Image (cartoon, helix red, strand yellow):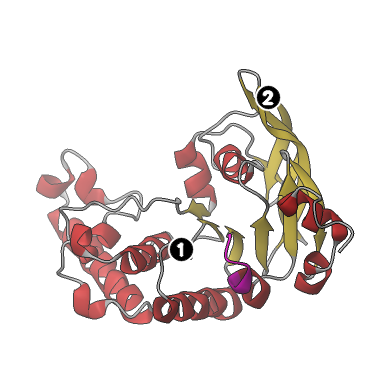
Amino acid sequence: MALLEISDVSKSFGGVQAVNRCSFEVEAGTITGLIGPNGAGKTSLFNLVTGFYKPDTGRVLFQGKDITAKPPYHIFNAGICRTFQITREFKEMTVLENLMLVPSQQLGERLFAPWFLSGRVRKQEREIYAKAIEVLEFINLIELKDEYAGNLSGGQKKLVELARTMMASPKMILLDEPGAGVNPTLMQKLIGHIKTLCSDHGITFLLIEHDMDMVMNLCQPVIVMSEGSKLMQGTPDEVRNDQRVLEAYLGGQYAAA
């Protein structure tokens, strides 16, 4: 069953066609890889799905509902979360505070609720705190809960990004290069967490990644983009052995090899 449907989506910036009538589906319960050479349109496509860009053509459906060009908060509330190539943590807040900010509809954010609904505000804050602690324990960052997020290593910040998406109880997570700048030890932890979230928590993943070892060991299926469009889709082995993929990455110079 398709959870996310991208149909004939295009986006240009001036004379540059970033996404060109791209179409594919992401099935529920999968970890789907999205790969392609630099400039293939992968991140632009993420921005179209999550409402940061408005497409020139095409539609985006999530759970059968049209979310095309909806604002990011609407798409977030529908159950789609994302991360970015460059982490966007609140550097001068603790790791725990970064997580507790995420849940929407917090009573404490309303102007008069802390005065007139103080009991309900405290109850909700305790629940959010408990969930944040649970997530940090799952992600193996509980010992850093009181550390300023800006002091973390690049790999630890990637884990915090994943932890923040979990605070929203999403149906689908879009990961933009989760392995970039992550050392091998943290990379294995990250891969393990993604697999567990998919298998045990039912979260569907679509991830952009240039680390082919990570893609081949984690993703099924793999979608390849080139020049703004879907080039092909298949299993990791099918992608690895497809001549079109080789040509897209290497410009055809090894096509006869």
Q: Is residue 26 visible?
A: no
Query: What secondary structure prevails in the magenta region?
Result: helix
Q: Position of residue 57 (x, y in %)?
A: 73, 27
**Closer to viewer: mark 1 or mark 2:** 2
Kind of residue indicated by mark 1: Ser
Marking on residue 56: 2
SS at badge 1: loop
Q: Position of residue 28 (x, y in %)?
A: 69, 64
Which residue position holds label 1?
A: 169
Label 1 Cα neighbours within 10 Å, binned few <14 / some 14-19 / many ≥20: some
Answer whether residue 198 is magenta in the image: no
The x and y percentages for residue 199 are 60, 79
- Is 53 left or right of 94, judged from the image as shown? right
Visible residue check, residue 135: yes
Closer to the camera, 129 or 113?
Answer: 129
Question: Residue at point 50% right, 34% down?
Answer: 71
Ranked by sequence position, the earlier of labels 1 and 2 is 2
The one of 213 and 114 positioned closer to us in this rendering: 213
Which quadrant of the figure has residue 195? bottom right
Q: CA distance from mark 1 to mark 2?
A: 31 Å
Q: Residue furthest left?
A: 115
Direction from residue 242 to residue 27 in the image, left or right: left
Residue 211 highlighted magenta (yes or no): yes
Boundaries of the magenta span = 210-214
Q: Amino acid at mark 2?
A: Asp
Furthest residue in direction top, as rendered? 14
Looking at the image, residue 87 lies above or below residue 159: above
Element class at badge 2: loop
- Which disc number belongs to residue 216? none
The N terminus sits in image quarter: bottom right
